[in-house]
Image (tube, rainbow, N blue to C red):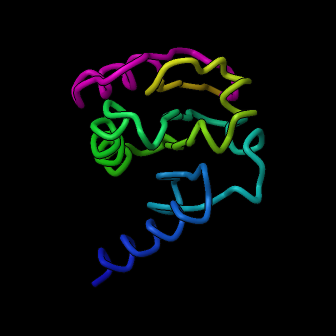
Amino acid sequence: MLKMFRFAFVLCVVILSSWQVVKSSDATIEDVHHQGFEKVISEGFVVIDFYATWCGPCKRLAPIFREISDEQNGVLFIKVDVEKEQEIAKKFEITHFPIVVFLKDGKEVHRFVGMRQKNEIISLLDQYK
């Protein structure tokens, strides 16, 4: 029942927000749009998945990103719909999809473009955390 509630909550968050936190230390899914993106990414280790809803590789990466976010502690996972958040996409110079960006205390430490397997992403997380 709790999983069903979380799924419904996730669905609501996705519909109501164009970027959302996938996992924080406090919650599995938390919409933090009201806090401001810059504040959210300024501390700790953050992984941002920049995606477009029509992008095939983005759709294939989504469940892997979700799975990793459920397994990792001390990492903030965020998904950004680049069509709805063009200013954020511009700031990060997003030109291809998907792009996953790793930030440490607000500074970019790594990025990759395109689909990656779960074990590759976990290895990168371990390397840059």
Asked if the stretch drawn in magenta spans residue 120, the answer is yes
In this rendered view, identify the residue nearer to me: 106 or 87.
Answer: 87
Q: Position of residue 124 (x, y in %)?
A: 36, 19
Quarter the N terminus occupies = bottom left
Q: Position of residue 80 (x, y in %)?
A: 57, 41
* Span highlighted in magenta in the image: 105-129
Q: Is residue 24 visible?
A: yes
Q: Is residue 7 left or right of residue 52?
A: left
Image-quadrant location for residue 33? bottom right
Q: Position of residue 90 (x, y in %)?
A: 71, 24
Q: In the rendered view, would you say 111 is above or below 67?
A: above
Q: Kindly give the residue lying farthest to the front in the view shown.
A: 54
Q: Is residue 47 visible?
A: no
In this rendered view, identify the residue nearer to me: 2 or 75.
Answer: 2
Report the residue at 27% width, 37% height from top.
60
Image-quadrant location for residue 84? top right
In this rendered view, identify the residue nearer to me: 94 or 67.
Answer: 94
Report the residue at 44% width, 61% height from top.
28
Q: In the rendered view, would you say 58 is above or below 71?
A: above
Report the residue at 49% width, 19% height from top.
96
Asked if the stretch drawn in magenta spans residue 92, the answer is no
Q: Is residue 5 left or right of residue 104?
A: left
Q: Position of residue 53 (x, y in %)?
A: 45, 43
Report the residue at 51% width, 54% height from top.
25
How many discs appear?
A: 0
